[in-house]
Image (tube, grey):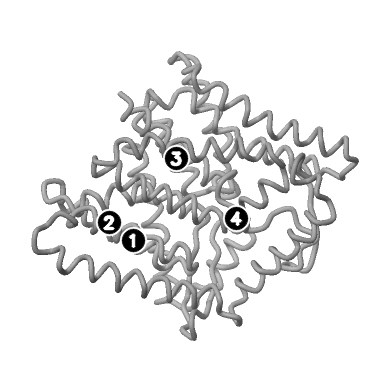
Amino acid sequence: MGNALFMLFILILTLDPTGSILHLKNLSFVLLVAYNMVCFRPDYRKLPIVIISFSVVIISWIFATIQDVYVNLDGVIALLKAVSPMLLLLWVREYDLLALARVPIVVGSLVIVFLFWLVVLVPVAEGVVYHFFNTASDDTVIMSWRSFLGIELFGMYYKSLASFILVFAVYVADFFNKEKRNWKTVCGTILIFHAFVISGTRSTMLLPFVLIGFNVYREYKNTRYFKYILYPAIIFIGIAFLVLLYMLISEKNEASNLVKYAHLYSYWELFSEHPIYLLLGQGPGTSFYSAGFGRVTSVTEWTYLELIRNFGMCSLVIIYVFYRPLVDLWKERKNSHTNSLLWGYLIYLFVAGTNPLMLSSTGMIVLLIIYSYVERIRR
């Protein structure tokens, strides 16, 4: 029963991360928490993480009130709801969430790929799909035609896409393992890879290539003759990748670049005028003027700077919660799954730095899965 409820919860967060389509996110969460409270003894070692995470939001709100900064209470409540899945850390040791997440992630990938090719092959469907997701679903899907280095591409970015990275990491590890490679592994790898590539955002489009590159290196680095091919190839591909990355981030005509760099300038101005925010934070539910959007905003794409703006030095607690599993993954990196998950999770944390993907449904899926896996390797 617990496995079914957890799988259903992950499926709902995958298909409807904003909770505006199915309207089942809150209900599924309450049912899951209630079931675990009745059936399992909490892991009290995780209780400090849960308490501190909620306390950071509340304490920062109090500091904002003391500083007489206007706080939108709806924003505070939304942030508390965003971190509420951390309660499930008390029971993740009872589940293999990496295994339970496979079906929801595959289903989510199928939905993304189907919608993409529906729009591409049936142009009249683009308006219908765009209208639905732009109005009825709180932008769960972002559709766009974007130009990268002069090449125009259509992209379909699902807000929960980044949470696919850990399941994809396991599929890739099994794909390069002859003993575990089968038709399910091949199909799963190709399907999720496809979902990433058609996303239309640079970080998620490059993500699967980087992860596959790490797995190629791990699998073949000790091969006798392949070394003469592998190392020159790594150097060549690495240089090519860095050049491509530099060209993408320095492309002056790319709207996303202009917005992000303008955000950085606005952060600099904010912290220069109010250095106390670096210590105490401006507070959750607060906003500031960003030249990137040309208006007052409460959220930008620079996640780590946003954490500092909201929580000040308390943001280090949130960052610690997300980065702590890396220590355990590194210790067991000789295992193919753990090694692939290590790099996959690192890539996710990097991508999350330029996208609002941490204190959200997407971030909570990734956090719960990785803590569940860490509990299993500790045993």
User: Residue 276: image x %, image y %?
Assistant: 81, 44
Alpha-carbon distance for marks 1 and 3?
20 Å
Secondary element under disc 4, as helix, strand or loop, is loop
Alpha-carbon distance for marks 3 and 2?
19 Å
- Residue type at the position of mark 3: Ile
Alpha-carbon distance for marks 4 and 2?
28 Å
Badge 4 is on which residue?
137
Secondary element under disc 2, as helix, strand or loop, is helix
In front: label 3 or label 4: 3
Secondary element under disc 3, as helix, strand or loop, is helix
In this picture, residue 265 sits left or right of residue 50: right
Alpha-carbon distance for marks 4 and 1?
25 Å
Residue 189, labelled with which disc?
2
In front: label 1 or label 3: 1
Residue located at (67% from left, 51% from top) = 306
User: Residue 342: image x %, image y %?
Assistant: 36, 45
Secondary element under disc 1, as helix, strand or loop, is helix
- Residue type at the position of mark 4: Ser
Residue 10, labelled with which disc?
3
Mark 3 and mark 2 lie on one chain; the one further toward the N terminus is: 3
Alpha-carbon distance for marks 3 and 4?
18 Å
- Residue type at the position of mark 1: Phe
Badge 1 is on which residue?
193
Mark 1 and mark 3 lie on one chain; the one further toward the N terminus is: 3
Mark 3 and mark 4 lie on one chain; the one further toward the N terminus is: 3
Mark 3 surroundings: few (<14), some (14-19) or many (≥20) residues within 10 A: many
Mark 4 and mark 2 lie on one chain; the one further toward the N terminus is: 4
**Is 324 located above or below residue 119 in the figure?**
above
Frontmost residue, 280 versus 373: 280
Q: Are marks 1 and 2 in contact (CB under 8 Å)?
A: yes
